[in-house]
Amino acid sequence: MAINYDQIMSLASLGVEVAYSDRDVMLYALGVGFGRDPLNARELRYVYENDLQTLPTFATVIGFGHSVLARSGINWFKAVHGEQRLMLEKPLPPEGVVICDERVVGAIDKRERGAIIVLEKVIREKSSGDKLCTMGATVFARGDGGFGGPRDGAPVPHDLPERAPDLAVECDTRPDQALLYALSGDRNPLHRDPDFARLAGFDRPILHGLCTYGTACRAVIAGVCDGDARRIAGFDARFSAPVFPGETIVTEMWVDGAVVSFRSKVKERNSLVLNNGKCTLR
């Protein structure tokens, strides 16, 4: 079924109430690799309820599964998560009840190359009404071009500096990383079922893209933020290629004042998996 431009641009999911606990916050942190060294105080603060901090990228799993794109009519077998953006008004609390509003804010027609669907999600505290964060996501629907929508208007990726990186941080992933990360909400069998992964063209399950995204945030926190995630006000990246659980993600960074540009590669294959990264510091 072809995309109907007016219909997809009207899609919204408003007022979705979501409660999360410190257990959810700690489980997510474990899912993106925190706590490998249980004696590391800089990481313990994300996986132990004593003075618990919430990772900024935890926002991506709050209310997971309520996406408006379920009603979009796009061909999911040819759709990929292309970009993820995050802007935080203040650090996320370690537990709470929030209200989520999500809507489609763009549908760009690339004709034979497919369609670009742009989503926006705002999360607010229920008790105060204060905005916690705004997220943006870009989906490349490669089988859905030619619906007559505008050809321009997609988000412009962040340009990386041309000089050599200022630093790089290696983060391991475990062979069972996708099984653990899936417990935070995304139970797509592509990431856990070997038979399903082979049907999709992979010889084994691949890591969730948002787990790679969270792992890159883990690297920036370690390399630039002295272990303090509260310094992060924004975190954007473009997905380039999959990671297989058990591989090592190397995140290269360029520090220019309050902007940390970054990209991530898989060490074992020298494959670029995240690109055009931009972390904004407070």
Image: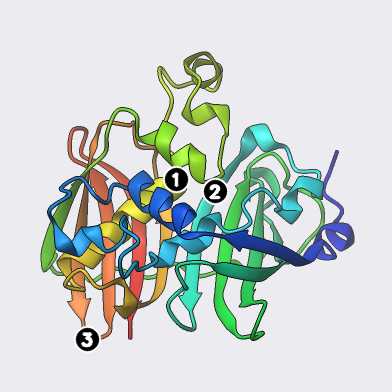
Residue sitting farthest toward the top: 195
Residue 162 seen in render: no
At x 72% / y 47%, what residue is drawn? 145
Crowding around mark 1 (Cα neighbors within 10 Å: few <14, some 14 to 19, many 20+) is: many
Q: Are marks 2 and 1 in contact (CB under 8 Å)?
A: yes
Q: Judge whether residue 206 can be spotted in this image.
A: yes
Local crowd size for mark 3, using a 10 Å CA cut-off: few (<14), some (14–19), many (≥20): few
User: Split into 4 quadrants, where in the image is the N terminus?
Assistant: top right
Q: Nearer the viewer, residue 245 or 24?
A: 24
Query: What residue does disc 3 label?
Result: 257
**Could you tell me which quadrant the C terminus lies in?**
bottom left
Mark sitting earlier along the chain (2/3): 2
Pointer 2 residue: 81
CA distance separating discs 2 and 3: 29 Å
The residue lying toward the viewer, choosing from 139 and 85, is 85
Which element carries disc 2, helix, strand or loop?
strand
As shown in the figure, which amino acid type bears the numbered disc 3? Gly
For the residue marked with disc 2, what is the amino acid?
His
- Of labels 3 and 1, earlier in sequence is 1
Kind of element beneath mark 1? helix
Q: Residue at x 30, y 79 (%)?
A: 231
* Place of residue 48 in the rendered image (x, y in percent of width and height, measured from the top left): 31, 57
The residue that disc 1 covers is: 209
Residue furthest to the front in view is 50
Q: Amino acid at mark 1?
A: Gly
Residue 217: assigned label: none
Whether residue 214 sits left or right of residue 18 in the image: it is left
x, y percent for residue 225: 21, 73
The answer to the question of whether label 2 and label 3 lie on touching residues, with beta carbons closer than 8 A, is no
Q: Residue at x 13, y 57 (%)?
A: 40
Asked whether the residues under the numbered discs 3 and 1 touch, taking CB atoms below 8 Å apart as contact, a structural biologist would say no
